[in-house]
Amino acid sequence: MQATAEIKYIRISDRKLRDLSRNLRGMSAKRALSNLMFTPTKGARLLIKAIESAVANATNTHKMNGDALHILRIEILKGPFFKRWNPVSRGMAHAIKKRTSHIKIVLTDRKNGEKEKETRLHSPERSDGGQGKGEKDLSAQVGTKILSDNKKGEKEIPKKEEAKKEVAKKENKKK
C-alpha cells in the first residue's frame, strides 16, 4: 500500500531540493528523517516536513505501520516563479526569477522484504521494436540480410565464408 504527501508552492529552487532528495530514495522514513536532521539547509527542513506529513498520512488514514515505511518515490517539480526587476545603468532593468517548487513523496510498506515493481522506461514491447536512440538497426550490420522469401522479415546471418565473399565483391565493385 502507498501513502502520499504533497507540498506545493514552496519558495525554494527545485535544484536545491533535488540534490538533497536524490540520496533519500529507497531509505526507510526514519533513517531519512535522521539524515535530514543533521543537514543545516532550508531544503532539508522542508523535506523533513514533507516526510513527516507522509508518515502521518500513512499511519492515520491508511493504518500502516510507521516503522515499516520506506520512501518509494520523491518528486521535485518546478513551480511558477515570481518575476522581479533589478534596475541597472542607462535606464535598463534585469529580470530576477524567484523560483518555487512542489514536493511529492510516496511512501510504501514493504512486506517480508518484497520489492516494489519498478516501471521500466524502455521495454522490449515498444512500438519501435526495442530499438531506441543510439541503437543500430540489425539489418544495417555487415553480413546480415533480410530473407526475401520470409514474410515475417526475420533476419538471417550468413556464415563467415559467405560474409567474406560479400565483402570481397563490394571491394571489387569499388575498384
Image (tube, rainbow, N blue to C red):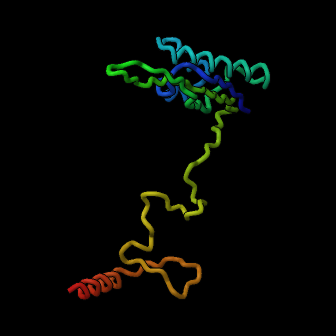
Q: Residue at x 55, y 63 (%)?
A: 128
Residues 94 and 58: in front is 94
Q: Residue at x 63, y 28 (%)?
A: 104
Image quarter where the C terminus lies is bottom left
Residue 77 in sight from this viewpoint: yes
Q: How many marks?
A: 0
Query: Residue 108 location in percent, x, y?
Result: 68, 30
Left or right, 79 with respect to 173, comes to: right
Q: Quadrant of residue 169?
A: bottom left
Residue most toward the left?
175
Residues 123 and 28: in front is 123
- Is 91 located above or below residue 156 in the figure? above
Q: Residue at x 55, y 53 (%)?
A: 122
Left or right, 63 with respect to 101, comes to: right
Q: Quadrant of residue 86?
A: top left
Left or right, 131 with respect to 94, comes to: right
Query: Residue 54 location in percent, x, y?
Result: 68, 22
Query: Residue 78 location in percent, x, y?
Result: 55, 31
Residue 20 in sight from this viewpoint: no
Image quarter where the N terminus lies is top right
Residue most toward the front?
91
Residues 112 and 147: in front is 147
Q: Residue at x 57, y 59 (%)?
A: 124
Query: Residue 31 location in percent, x, y?
Result: 56, 19
